[in-house]
Image (cartoon, grey):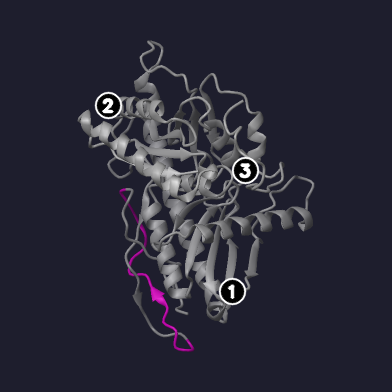
Amino acid sequence: MDDDDQYQSGYDVGSFPKDFGYTPFDGDGDGSAGPLTGDQKPRILLMGLRRSGKSSIQKVVFHKMSPNETLFLESTNKIIKDDICNSSFVQFQIWDFPGQIDFFDPTFDSDMIFGGCGALVFVIDAQDDYMEALNKLHLTVTKAYKVNQAIKFEVFIHKVDGLSDDYKMETQRDIHTRANDDLIDSGCDQIHLSFHLTSIYDHSIFEAFSKVVQKLIPQLPTLENLLNILISNSAIEKAFLFDVVSKIYIATDSSPVDMQSYELCCDMIDVVIDVSCIYGLREEVEAAAFDSQSSSLIKLNNGTILYLREVNKFLALVCILREDNFDRQGVIDYNFLCFRNAIQQVFELRNKALAAATSNNTTGISSNNHSTSPVSNNLSEPRPSSSLAGGSQPLMPTTQPTTSAAGNSSGSLTQNGTAVLAQS
């Protein structure tokens, strides 16, 4: 068995039907060029001691397994490689390592393991004595950093559902202090560790993995800026761009993420999928329950509205706004269409760069005009133009999108040179 045998039955995360999952691209309106090759995919390593919960995390987040079912998982005794390759932005490999792995074993190829790694997730069981885990964490990150200084190091303080709030914070503070002190004592203070409190019995594991995945998306600054422009012109309080199947949000606006709001958005996606599977049309060829017609509007009793719109067959925009600000739904819908077109442009630029990089690698010709990694959208800030009927001012693009180095934080919306966003 792998982990989590101390959990009590109760909260169940995720209610997707077993036959609902990622499907291959069909190229219709998704701006996708197909999955990345193995060499192009970022790699996430799951490491930690035995029975810390690594395999359970992977199964719950990416394979829709019920948390209670993880009690019956067998212990991992070899490296398990899992391709997450069917969403346009969420494309990576997860390598689940056995807890008893020995870095000093001659058969352990550190250069191969850590060389192509994007993020290393180290799982620590918060309900167990974690001193041995901290020693293993220190050995792991120092070994990995020598091979690849670009790795993002994430520490999941796991199984915290059985701890009180005070003890959770005390445990996190103690682990944070000890881990960083060990790095400073060994002269490795340049290594940065990020810490997350997680449990498979609530949404904390999805939120934590969202933060991990976002660091592997070069287009993240552009996506965040697009969301900021959208909510500022539509009187929206919070917006998430979700990967529908995993419930990982690949981007959100710059305002702080409230855990309760994130849970509401996740539950809304569950409702949409469940209702679509029950009442949606099924063709001869099995179709995904989430399609181009998917949308939902839920009014809460506190005057808040949850609004979901399909971006493409893998991504959904979920917004939170006040009911008083929803009286001009037409403006919000129009702004959403502009936002979706901008997302489409990000896809197209990314795929062009990937195609060029693949072509150059194949022919052996290097090019200074394309990066070998996905690129982001370098877009200029919009400026007000002539007024629309009713006094609303649309936002006009100053330039057409151009490619740039990944990570540029500027961005605006364009729609074939026409007005972009109408202010609510």
Return the disc, 3 or 2, that comes first in the chain's sequence.
Answer: 3
Are there few (<14), some (14-19), or many (20+) residues within 10 Å of tag 3? some
Q: Which mark is residue 22?
A: 3
- Residue plotted at (20% across, 30% down): 187
Q: Is residue 394 magenta?
A: yes
Q: Amino acid at mark 1?
A: Asn
What residue do we see at 78% from left, 50% from top? 283
Tell which tag, 3 or 2, sits nearer the viewer. Answer: 2
Q: Inspect the image, locate mark 2, and give the three-letter code of the amino acid beneath it.
A: Lys
User: Label 2: which residue?
Assistant: 146
Q: Is residue 50 visible?
A: yes
CA–CA distance between discs 3 and 2? 36 Å
**Which of 215 and 4 lies nearest the eye of the viewer?**
4
Going from N to C along the chain, the mark reached first, 1 or 3, is 3
Residue 143 is a magenta residue: no
Identify the magenta region.
389-405
Describe residue 349's horizontal placement relative to residue 329 as left or right: left
Viewer-side label of 2, 1: 1
Q: Which mark is residue 302?
A: 1
Residue 180 in the image: state x and y as whole percent.
28, 37
Q: Residue at x 38, y 28 (%)?
A: 131
Query: What is the count of numbered marks?
Result: 3
The residues bearing labels 2 and 1 have C-alpha atoms spaced at a distance of 52 Å
Q: What percent of the width, then of the height, locates residue 209?
A: 48, 44
Point 54% across, 19% down: residue:
77
Viewer-side label of 1, 3:
1
Going from the N terminus, do you reach mark 2 or mark 1 first? 2
Residue 87 in percent (x, y) is at 54, 45
Alpha-carbon neighbours of circle 1 within 10 Å: few (<14), some, or many (≥20)? few
Please tell me whether mark 1 sits on a helix, a strand or a loop.
loop
Dot 2 lies on which element? helix
Of helix, strand and loop, which one carries label 3?
A: loop
